[in-house]
Image (tube, grey):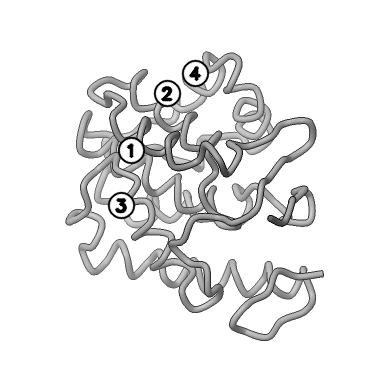
C-alpha cells in the first residue's frame, strides 16, 4: 500500500516515481530561486522549510513532524515521545568543523523527523551547512550508494565511515547546479517506505 497522498496514487512504485519526478523539479526550484541561501544553516526550522517545499504537492504532512514511530531493520529512529527534545538538542549542536557537521547530520538521521522524504531533505540541509561553514559541498556522484547506506546504518554507533566517505567527496563547486542535483538523485534515496515499520499512535 502506498502512503496516503494528494495525488490519489495507490501503487507504491507509481508513487515513488511521482515523488522522484516532483521532488527533483522542486529541488531545482529551491536552488534556482535562492531560497536555500535565506535559510539558517543547521536549524531544524530550515529542514522543515526544505521538506515542505519538496513535498507539498505530494503529501499533506509536508514539513510536519511524523505521527508514527519508525524503524528500519533492527534500528528504531527517535521515539515520538523524545523527538522534539532530540530536535532541540540538534539545533544546539556545534557545526563549525567538518566533524561537527557530520555528527549533526548523523543525529538528524537518527531523529528522522518526517514520515517520508528524510534523506532527500536532509542531504540538502547538510550541504547548506557545509557551504556556510567550510565553503564546500558533497559531490554525490563520488559517493558509492552501497557504501553510503551501510555507513549511515552504522553511523549511530560508529561515524568514522560516513565521515571518511563524505570527506572524500567534498568539492568547492558550491554553486554548481549539477553537483547540487546529485544529492536529490533517486539512486541515493533510502529506498522504499515499505521497508519501514510503523507504529500508529
**Residue 108 appears left or right of 42:** right
Which structural element holds mark 1? strand
Dot placed on the residue nearer the N-terminal end, 3 or 2: 3
Which structural element holds mark 3? helix
Dot placed on the residue nearer the N-terminal end, 4 or 3: 3
Quadrant of residue 28 in the image?
bottom left
Question: Which of the pair 129/175 is nearer the observer?
Answer: 129
Measured in 3D between alpha carbons, the distance from the residue under mark 1 to the one under mark 2, in whole angstroms, is 16 Å
Quadrant of residue 72 in the image?
top right
Q: Which mark is residue 46?
A: 3
Q: Single out the mark in the foreground, 2 or 4.
A: 2
Measured in 3D between alpha carbons, the distance from the residue under mark 3 to the one under mark 2, in whole angstroms, is 18 Å
Q: Single out the mark in the foreground, 1 or 3.
A: 3
Which corner quadrant holds the C terminus? bottom right
Measured in 3D between alpha carbons, the distance from the residue under mark 1 to the one under mark 3, in whole angstroms, is 17 Å
Measured in 3D between alpha carbons, the distance from the residue under mark 4 to the one under mark 3, in whole angstroms, is 26 Å
Dot placed on the residue nearer the N-terminal end, 1 or 3: 3
Identified at 35% across, 46% down, the residue is 44
Q: Residue furthest bottom?
A: 8
CA neighbours of label 1 inside 10 A, class few (<14), some (14 to 19), many (20+): many
Dot placed on the residue nearer the N-terminal end, 2 or 4: 2
According to the image, label 1 marks what residue?
Answer: 137
Q: Which mark is residue 164?
A: 4
According to the image, label 2 marks what residue?
Answer: 103
Q: Name above or below for residue 179 compared with residue 50.
A: above
Task: Report x, y in % for residue 1.
Answer: 82, 69
Question: Which of the pair 19/62 is nearer the observer?
Answer: 62
Which structural element holds mark 4? helix
Q: Name above or below for residue 97 compared with residue 153.
A: above
Q: Single out the mark in the foreground, 4 or 3.
A: 3
Amino acid at each position: 500500500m502506498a502512503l496516503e497522498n494528494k495525488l490519489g496514487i495507490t501503487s507504491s512504485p507509481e508513487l515513488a516515481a511521482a515523488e522522484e519526478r516532483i521532488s527533483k523539479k522542486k529541488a531545482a526550484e529551491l536552488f534556482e530561486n535562492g531560497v536555500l541561501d535565506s535559510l539558517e544553516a543547521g536549524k531544524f526550522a530550515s529542514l522543515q522549510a526544505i521538506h515542505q517545499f519538496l513535498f507539498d504537492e505530494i503529501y499533506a504532512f509536508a514539513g510536519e513532524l511524523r505521527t508514527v514511530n519508525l524503524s528500519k531493520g533492527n534500528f528504531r529512529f527517535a521515539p515520538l515521545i523524545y523527538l522534539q527534545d532530540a530536535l532541540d538538542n540538534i539545533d544546539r549542536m556545534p557545526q563549525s568543523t567538518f566533524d561537527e557537521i557530520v555528527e549533526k547530520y548523523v543525529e538528524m538521521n537518527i531523529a528522522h523527523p518526517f514520515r517520508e522524504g528524510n534523506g532527500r531533505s536532509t542531504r540538502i540541509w547538510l550541504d547548506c551547512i557545509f557551504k556556510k561553514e567550510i565553503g564546500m559541498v558533497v559531490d554525490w556522484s563520488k559517493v558509492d550508494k552501497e557504501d553510503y547506506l551501510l555507513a549511515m546504518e552504522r553511523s549511530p554507533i560508529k561515524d568514522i565511515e560516513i565521515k571518511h566517505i563524505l570527506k572524500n567527496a567534498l568539492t568547492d563547486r558550491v554553486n554548481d547546479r549539477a553537483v547540487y542535483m546529485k544529492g536529490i538523485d533517486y539512486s541515493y534515496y533510502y529506498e522504499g517506505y515499505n521497508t519501514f515499520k510503523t507504529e500508529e499512535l
